[in-house]
Amino acid sequence: APQPGDSTTTTSSSSSSSSSKKSSSSSKRKKSQFDEFHEFELVGILLGVAIHNSILVDAPFCKYLFKKLLDPELEPTLEDLAEAAPAIARSLRVIMASAQSGPGPGSSSGSSEEPSFETLYPTLSFEASYRVSNGGGANGLNSVAVAELAPDGASKPVTRENAAEYVRSYVRWYLCDSVDSAFAAFKRGFDRVVEDGHVWRLLTPADLELLIRGSPTLDFEALRTAATYEDGYDEDSETVTHFWHVVEDLDELDKLKLLKFVTGSDRAPIRGLGAARFVISRSAAVDQLPSSHTCFSHLVLPDYKDVTLLRNKLLVAITESNEGFGLR
């Protein structure tokens, strides 16, 4: 038979077990958050190293990130949000248009065919909802969390008079507050390599994007002029001449593929393709496809004697092997 105190012991044991589980869960959560922010810091370090070594990185960040790297206190605009999250920006613009054009709450229903702003958005308040992953990877469950955009935001309705304030608050929450910890870790890593100084204040966000991603303007004639040759090739070699004729006839997409196949990036350095390194060396293995060493922007081109064969082999190489190092 149970003795006095058994239930207490059982409860204590159960409580201890429950406490242990909660502690373990909390520890895992903190570790997960640490790992996540640590990864953002590593990405910042990688970008800093890329700039330091003049290496282009295919990092298609929204333009506001480049603005914020140069000025962390910069207030975002609706135009910044439109580039990062166009669907949300469109919704906010509709709200603004409704606030500016719709009849006021005191208008009689017969004075206008348009419903009032409060009729259109009867439940809209200074809140933002977002999905939170509960773990389990890509197939994990998601729950909906709510962030207040103003003190006691749940009790503050959006009206015609404060619609502009609501839009500004939402934009700031989306681009700043919701990612504050992640951005702080990212910038901390970036600043560890690229020292903050007066020189950065001379750059525009477009300049910084060019340093990291390179220029989208591609001049292949300038690339041909800057190209160098090794292992028996020179600019007058028959295969080299055939190669540049084939390149000239490629469409824009295939030219991008070729550039990425050889250099690892489909964009030009900040000074254009004329400043890029592009080496073509000879190979006698005409039964093989062209190959490349992207770290050295080096194309190994077999000495094909037929221009049609060269074209076919090159297209297979750049189409089927157009994956390399890059951020995803």
Image (cartoon, rainbow, N blue to C red):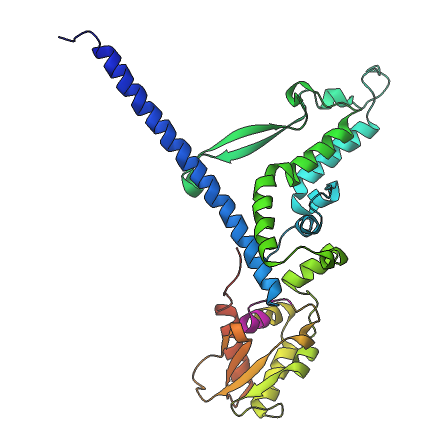
Depth check: give the residue in front, 296 or 319.
296
Q: How many marks?
A: 0
**Quadrant location of the N terminus?**
top left
Q: Position of residue 116 (x, y in %)?
A: 78, 21
Specify the quadrant of the image occupied by residue 75: top right
Residue at image x 59%, y 57%? 59
Specify the quadrant of the image occupied by residue 197: bottom right
Q: Position of residue 174 (x, y in %)?
A: 64, 38
Q: Is residue 270 visible?
A: yes
Residue at image x 66%, y 69%? 269
Depth check: give the residue in front, 122 or 20.
20
Q: Position of residue 263 (x, y in %)?
A: 56, 72
Specify the quadrant of the image occupied by residue 226: bottom right
Taking the view exactly as shown, the residue that stands out farthest to the left is 1
Q: Is residue 56 visible?
A: no
Depth check: give the residue in front, 193 or 103.
193
Q: Is residue 219 above or below residue 99?
A: below
Inspect the magenta stretch and tell me whether residue 262 lies in it: yes
Taking the view exactly as shown, the residue that stands out farthest to the right is 111
Residue at image x 65%, y 41%? 175
Is 161 situated left or right of 157 in this image? right
Q: Position of residue 222 (x, y in %)?
A: 70, 78
Q: Is residue 144 above or below residue 247?
A: above
Q: Main secondary structure of the magenta part?
A: helix
First to last magenta residue range? 258-267
Inspect the magenta stretch and tell me whether residue 169 lies in it: no
Is 306 situated left or right of 154 in this image? left
